[in-house]
Image (cartoon, rainbow, N blue to C red):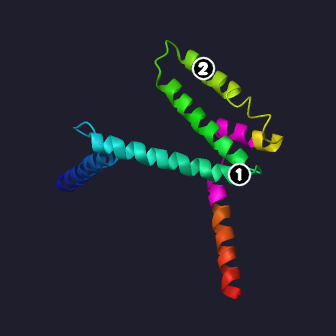
Amino acid sequence: MKKVVLFIFAILLGLNVHAQRRGSSLNNIPQSNREPTKQEIAKYEREAEERKEQYIANFLTTLEADEFQKQIIKINLNSFLEEKIALLNTKFEHRLDREEAVKNLEDTHFLELQELISKSDMEKIKELIKGDFNEKEVVKDKKKKRKKKKRKNNDD
C-alpha cells in the first residue's frame, strides 16, 4: 500500500514539474543577442514606408475629393506623419509635454486644408488622426468591387 501511494505521489509530482517547464518555455520570447544590421534597418524602413504609402492610398479612396485635392491631402498626411514621428522620437521631460505637443500638431496641421476640401472629407481626416479609420473595411470593399467587375467582365 505504501508503495502505491508513493508511486502515485511521484507521478503527480513529475507531471506538475513537467507542466511547469513546458508552460514556461511556451511563454518565453526569443531574445536576440545581436544588434540589427544596417541592411535589416534599411529593409525595415523601406517596408514601413511602403506600408505607410499603402495606408494613405487606402484612406484616399474613401474621400470624395478630386485628384488634385487628393494629392494635396496626401502631401499633408505625409508631412503630418513625419512631424508626429519626429515629436515622438524627441525626448521630453514629462509625458504630458509630449502629449500636449502631439495634440497641438493634430489641431493645427490641417487648418489650411479645411478651406480646400469638404466638411465630410475633413471629418474623415480627423477620424484618421484619432486612429478611428478602419482600413480592413476599405480593403474588403475594394475586393468586392474587383470581384463584381471580374464577374461582369466574365458575363459579357
Quadrant for residue 34, please give it: top left
Q: Distance between the residues labelled 1 and 2?
A: 32 Å
Other-residue count near label 2 (Cα within 10 Å), few / some / many at <14 / 14–19 / ≥20: some
Q: Which of 120 and 24 is in front in this view?
A: 120
Q: Mark 1 highlights which residue?
A: 67
Q: Residue 92 carries which label?
A: none
Q: In which quarter of the image is the C terminus?
A: bottom right
The three-letter code of the residue at mark 2 reads: Ala
- The x, y position of residue 114, in whole percent, is 78, 34
Foreground mark, 1 or 2?
Answer: 1
**Is residue 30 visible to the viewer in this orientation of the structure?**
no
Q: Mark 2 highlights which residue?
A: 101
- The x, y position of residue 42, in whole percent, is 35, 43
Q: In which quarter of the image is the N terminus?
A: bottom left
**Residue at position x 63%, y 43% from top?**
74
- The x, y position of residue 133, in whole percent, is 66, 45
Hey, which residue is sitting farthest left in the picture? Answer: 3
Up/down of 135 relative to 91, above or below: below
Q: What is the count of numbered marks?
A: 2
Hey, which residue is sitting farthest front in the picture? Answer: 68
Residue 3 shown left or right of residue 122 in the figure: left
Q: Which of 119 and 20 is in front in this view?
A: 119
Residue 142 shown left or right of residue 3 in the figure: right
- Magenta segment: 124-139
Hey, which residue is sitting farthest bottom in the picture? Answer: 156
126 part of magenta stretch: yes
Up/down of 96 relative to 2, above or below: above
